[in-house]
Image (cartoon, helix red, strand yellow):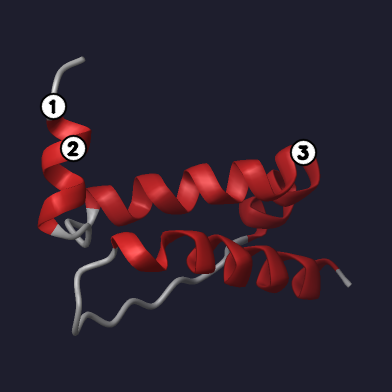
Amino acid sequence: MQRNKVKRLLREAFAHAEGDLKQDQDMVVVARPAAAELAEREGLAGVDASLADLIARAGLLSTAVEVVEGAEP
């Protein structure tokens, strides 16, 4: 049951981030036991934030998103 919940939340988080990703990139995400804990504790918001951080650290954001996020307010 836990595994299915984590998979569902990861799919939904990827759907949110899809428009911000560079084209022609492949990404493999391995959900460790801590991902289930995060999903239970914070739900979609936690998985979304964690995935967004992972994507940014991997340098997989499209150029337009990097410029906007890197800009100072």
Q: Would you call the spot at circle 3 few (<14 residues within 10 Å), some (14-19), or many (20 or more)? A: few
* 54 relative to 28, above or below: above
Viewer-side residue, 32 vs 8: 8
Q: Quadrant of the N terminus?
A: bottom right
Q: At which x and y percent is residue 36?
A: 72, 56
Above or below for 41 versus 7? above
For label 2, the residue is 68
Give the percent coordinates (x, y) of residue 40.
80, 47
Q: What amino acid type is highlighted by mark number 2?
A: Val
Q: Within the image, what quadrant is residue 41 found in?
A: top right
Looking at the picture, does residue 39 appear above or below residue 11? above
Tag count: 3
What's the distance in space between the residues labelled 2 and 3, CA to CA? Answer: 30 Å
In contact (CB < 8 Å): disc 2 and disc 1:
yes
Query: Residue tagged by mark 3?
Result: 41
- Give the percent coordinates (x, y) of residue 45: 64, 42
Mark 2 crowdedness (10 Å alpha carbons): few <14, some 14-19, many ≥20: few
First in sequence: mark 1 or mark 3? 3
Query: What kind of residue is marked 1?
Result: Ala
Q: Is residue 47 above or below residue 29?
A: above
- Residue beneath disc 1: 71
